[in-house]
Amino acid sequence: MSDESPKAPSLAPVSLEDPHLQPYAKHPGRAEALAAAAMVIGFLGFIGFGITYWISDQTQWEAATLGGGMLALGVGAIAWGKYLMPQGPFVEERHDFHSTEAERDAMTAAIVERGGMVVQRRKVLGGLFALGSTAMGVVIAFPLIRSLGPKPATSRQATNTDTSLFATNWKENSQLVTADGRIVKVADLDVGGVLTVFPKGHEGSSPDQTILIRLAQIGPDDPPFQLESPGRTDWGVQGYVAYSKMCTHLGCPVGLYQKLTQQLVCPCHQSIFNVASGCIPEFGPAPRPLPQLPLKVDAFGNLRSQSGYQQAIGPGFWERP
Amino acid sequence: MIRGRYAIPAALLATVGIFGLMAFSPSAAQADSTTPTTVASAAGGYAYPTPTSTTPTTSPTSSAPSGYGTADITLPDSFIAPGQALFDASCASCHGADAAGTSRAPNLQGLGAGTVDFWVSTGRMPLAISSIQATVKPPRFDRLQTLQIAAFVQSKAPGTGMPIPIVNLSAANLEVGGSLFTLNCAACHTITGAGDALAGGAFAPSLHLATPTQIIEAIRSGPGDMPRFSEGNLTPTEAHDIAAYVHGVIQHPEDRGGFGLGGIGPVGEGFVGLLVGVGLLMLVCFWIGERT
Amino acid sequence: MIDSSLRWVDDRLGIAKGGRTFLDKIFPDHWSFMLGEIALYSFVVLLGTGVFLSLYYIPSAHEIVYHGGYLPLQGQKVSEAYASSVGLSFDVKSGLLMRQAHHWSADIFLGSIAVHMARVFFTGAFRKPREFNWIVGVTMLLLGIVNGFLGYSLPDDLVSGTGIRIAYSILESIPLAGSYLGTFLFGGNYPGNGIIIPRFYLLHILIVPALIVGLLAAHLGLLVKQKHTQFKGRGKTEHNVVGSPMFPTFMAKTTGFLFVTTAVTFILAGFAQINPIWQFGQYEPFQISYAVQPDWYMGWLDGALRIMPSWEFVGWGHTIPLEVLLPAVIFPGIIFNVFFAWPFIEARHTNDLAYHNLLDRPRDRPKRTGAGAMMLMLMFMVFGASSTDVLANFFQVPLNSVLWFFRIAVPLIPVITYFVTVKICEEMRGAEGIGKRKPPNVVHRSASGEFSTVPAEARPGDGHEELEAVPVPAFIDMVPADLATGPGIRRVMR
């Protein structure tokens, strides 16, 4: 066997005094003492962990005893291996592990000729088997993939927010409430105030999260607050504006409002939206303004929506026109 | 045992205002011999509610005892004159002699004593250097002087603006405070209160040194870029719950897992994991193996 | 005893021949060959601590009221996943140690893979015949990153929930299939019907680890089959391996190293707090904390997302969110395809079809070293871009300036790095004996004033005698020679 020939020399006995078998350490006694001390410390560390575990559950002591024990034991073992074991160096031959040309030819021939013999004679069977297994591969993917979850509702008329890509629960006249269900009144916020609101009955719902900001102190009879967004001058009311809190970049809640500069900042990737000009993205990766929610005040001084969002909220997707 | 941990800060908090007032007495006495009596009467008039419990309630609902957090400090008129002297010396050059503002600094009239207290007690005012945003530094004035300045500014527009709240966190609800903190504060100050950079060179400061009074003053007045949270937005009770959470949890985090690494999250952890973890192990490799 | 049991096993399995060869397997002694073992042993720690965690973690989004050891959460509505993760940190004895050890060893696992991969790359160890093992390794890196993300998403805390939200949006950005992938995987529009946590759990503890275990076996099997590479040196050729035998020397060292790796992980786990989820609170889709980043091995993707300009394609009734698709799908796709294909790219470029068992010094391959340095710098810069806000806060500079710095630096600095590295390598190659200690010279002045220089004689300790490498002995004559020749002593052949 070709494998054994290089091993043959090693079968001869080697004297214990062969320099290759001597320890690496100049002073093996010292090295042994070091390794022994480390292993004793390791043992004590583990005992310490056992005690620590039973008398208290203090994470730092557990880590110190367990980790310290492992460290010491490991250092001991390494010192043993490095300083006290045969220093070598030893060598091992490397053999070509590839096959000979003849063996390769034989395998190629086996595949090509035997296979060709079968396939050429029984073309129909081969084709049918391929057809069958392909069909199985396709249909097995149905339950694997299709059962995972519902199809997204890509129609703009779909109203179920569990699947619809476009709908939210904001409708005409939805009442603004806080996350814990408190009704939001027009007197609630001062200038420079922000509040996360939801349509009543959908508190905490992800697609409905909306940020309500009071930009100015304007009474009910004053002229409407002028936003720099064309066609939306009456979407704010008494200095209030409301925008979707879902970032148009990756859907993080845009919860960071800077009062002086009237900017909303997304804490995830620092897209900056200018609230006074319709939440146009001024900086960062967000591509679109935050959608605005038209507001009104009802007879009781409660804030309500004039309508739902008029475009899809959140990040972009293929079906978005 | 953990209850005990929170009981101590809570009990301390119940008296923090009194301590604040008492602490200045010696220096104030040197400055003005009439001060101690003023303070004594003032302190008596502050009417701290007696704590009903030294442990914050743990009830899951927000039905906290009604009424806490609604009282404000009434500054005595005797504070106005010394306050004016301090204002003239340190503030009037920018804000004007009657605190009505100049081209260099805003009008302070109508902002209320609480706003003044926040800016002065955190050391943000007087400004040391003009920058985008005033920074926290050791306060120039002691507690009494701060209150005197606040009284002077308040006297320019009596009855308007935010008063200095009386803070008693003994009945505050940490759990409600935690939820409200996450919803209203964490987006800027981070969930650990470490603070972070904002747009335009501004920054949200760390909350780790803020006193409960300053926290409520900041919530109500909205200093700088911070939004203002009116009582219609966060009720007095809720504001106190947030202050209790910041003081009891944010400032005394349960770092039972070891050093907190600055509370800045995975970036710090990644550096430690790579430099300390992988780095140490590479050194061990260096020991085990040959180095030629 | 050993003899008889070995015979019993060998009668049935025939292990003696292969086993003996395995015990004699030579491991090179150079320290850089230990780097992969950090990854191997971190994986062992991951499996061990992971089994512990899975005994207590409940993969469920079901909402319950928290009643556990962390007071500020008392009475809050949380998911079972979050409550059980906090419970592991507060109410399970040693639970926090195990949880943190699991997280730290994940960081160390991926970090050591990166270091190991850099070693393999810069020394050319991926060349023929080891392309398969390179591909297996890169696949394990990819799976490790994926499993890290899945794992830190499981506690359902505020920070990781934000990561899942971002992952959903990245899925959604894929043209045509995106919305379908999202609702299929999450069981509906984000946040779905609560199925994502159990699904991530299944992937995290079963499917991905099983794949990694299989690939790990292949990685080590290929290593044994193809044998180690080695650096050039005395007695080292393309046709041998010089070093220490598997048994006993390497076994002692590597077992010790297993303990040390575990020790470092556990000491970090007790003294450096990682991912304190109780401070973050339950994830709610409308809540957010500033300064949230993914773990470091995902940070480069987050950085790429941050510096991407807001280019969105809109037309023909469709939207392609390039501002997400390019940095989060195309960019990592390109990076990993380059990783996978590198051995073939390089072989094609150099027309080098020979076997390589001896390693290159990095300086001898300036272009490859330059390319590697460029990739490392690119990763480092994009990773840095994932903490623009933290950097802006730390250095007190405006956020926008930091972002603009990275927008320019990320494409620019890696290219500069390439040319600088190539130049340095070429300079190093040009100077003979660089990096070696120079022998001292003795300068003499003759009586006539003439100076002459001769090399000094070697002093003790200047060098050490090296033995010729020999095969591992099969039989050791355990009787010392002087005793063996003495009277009345019988020599026994073992």
Image: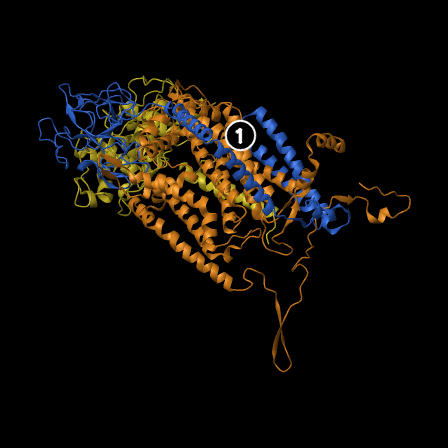
Q: In the figure, C411 relative to A58: above or below?
A: below
Left or right position of C164 against C481: left
Image location of residue A308, percent across then percent down: 19, 25
Colour chain C is painted in: orange
Image location of residue C441, percent across then percent down: 61, 69
Q: In the figure, B259 relative to A295: above or below?
A: below
User: Callout 1: 10 Å neighbours few (<14), some, many (20+)?
Assistant: many
Which residue lies at the image location 77% right of the left edge and 49% below the top edge? A17
Image location of residue A40, percent across then percent down: 67, 36
User: Which chain's colour is yellow?
Assistant: B
Label 1 marks a residue whose chain is C
- Name of the residue lying farthest toward the bottom: C448
Q: What residue is shown with label 1? A: C49
Colour chain A is painted in: blue
Q: Please name whichever residue, B121 or A15, is drawn nearer the observer in this view of the structure.
A: A15
Q: In the figure, C325 relative to A206: above or below?
A: below
